[in-house]
Image (cartoon, rainbow, N blue to C red):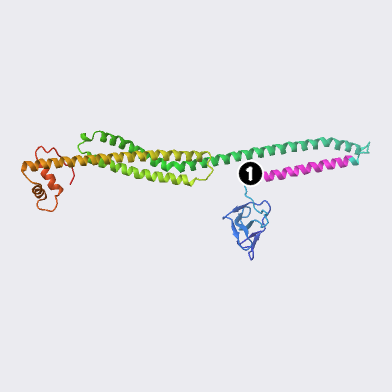
Amino acid sequence: TMTDGLVIKGGKTVRKVDVNEILEGLEEQIKEENLGLMRVKVKAEKDGKEGYVTVAGNQGTVFLENYTAYAAFQKSLESELKMLQEATKEATKYIDAKVEELRQVRVGPLFETKSDLAKMKPRVLKVQQGFSDLKKKVTQAEMKLNAAMEDEKKRRLEAADRKAAADLVEDVVKMAGVEEEKLSKVYPQGEQLLQNLGDDENPLAAIESLQKDLASSQESLSLTTGKIREKMESIKGQTCKGPMSEARNSLVKLKVKVGAMENRCKKLSQQLRSARADLSLQAEEALLKTLRIFARNEGLKADELFKKLSKGESAIKPEHLRELVERIPDAQLKAPAGSG
């Protein structure tokens, strides 16, 4: 029965719903709380009437089934086959009964009728055989269709698994690729700089630039490692097969690769820090040596040299020290461009 509202009690009946009638669902199924029944709003195909109908009863009785053109054809075919089977049974039963009634007849019109009935029996049996063959073909066709539907379902599931697996690793693969490309340029620059520190006009500036690049890459690699761990954790405990298993293996390999990149970054950063410390120490020693020679040549004592450099202030400003060093002949010292 189709009613005008979700709640059955007190609702107005729109009309009765016929068996095998086609209804279009207008909304999602919803539970009618009073009786605990699943109800859905529908529209009848044959007259356009709208209302609510019950999907299934409390005891499991199904009132509505999902409709497809194939399901409708299948039901119609089953009904036709059943009618044919019953008709052939009735025909066989009728012929057998009449032949039995006329069993004692030997002459006359009834004898001819008995002969005609006997001739009809093979025809009915032929129809029955045809029905049996058709039933087998229908069964085989259903099995073939079900197998094809299972194959399609499997194909779609596999496609969904492949997409899910690809989505799982796509962003971290891109992140790792960006840093790998960047570091492929930074590594050679750093190694060359470490081998030829004395040849670079401003090695401290070059070291500082490389250290910034390495620090940026280390931060990005750390984020990438974190994301890889999150993704591995998201599939932890799942039974991974096919594409998802491949995705997990890819994440493990990527984690190892990113870890190696991080370690190489740290190693090069440490080498650059050591080189910078060595350069600073060498520069400090060269400056002290130059100042000692200058003080000796000028006949200045330590406190006098301090007064000259500080210009009466409590500390020596870098620009004052630089100004003095640049005036010393043959000092062979050069402050980096842009230094204080």
Residue 205: in sight, yes or no? no
Read off the magenta span. Answer: 72-99
Instruction: Please state if 2 lies on the left or on the right of 220 as rendered.
Output: right
Residue type, label 1: Tyr
**How many residues crowd around disc 1 within 10 Å: few (fewer than 14), some, or many (20 or more)?**
few
Q: Quadrant of the N terminus?
A: bottom right
Picture layout, residue 256 above or below residue 49? above
Q: Residue at x 81, y 42 (%)?
A: 91
Q: Where residue 158 sits: x, y (%)?
A: 54, 40
Locate residue 95, reporting x and y percent: 85, 40
Q: Which quarter of the picture shows residue 174?
A: top left
The rendered magenta stretch, by its main secondary structure, is classed as: helix
Q: Is residue 144 magenta?
A: no
In the picture of the structure, the residue carrying the numbered disc 1 is 70
Say which of 200 and 63 sits in front: 200
Percent x, y of residue 5? 60, 62
Secondary element at tag 1: helix
User: Does the magenta run of residues contain 81?
Assistant: yes
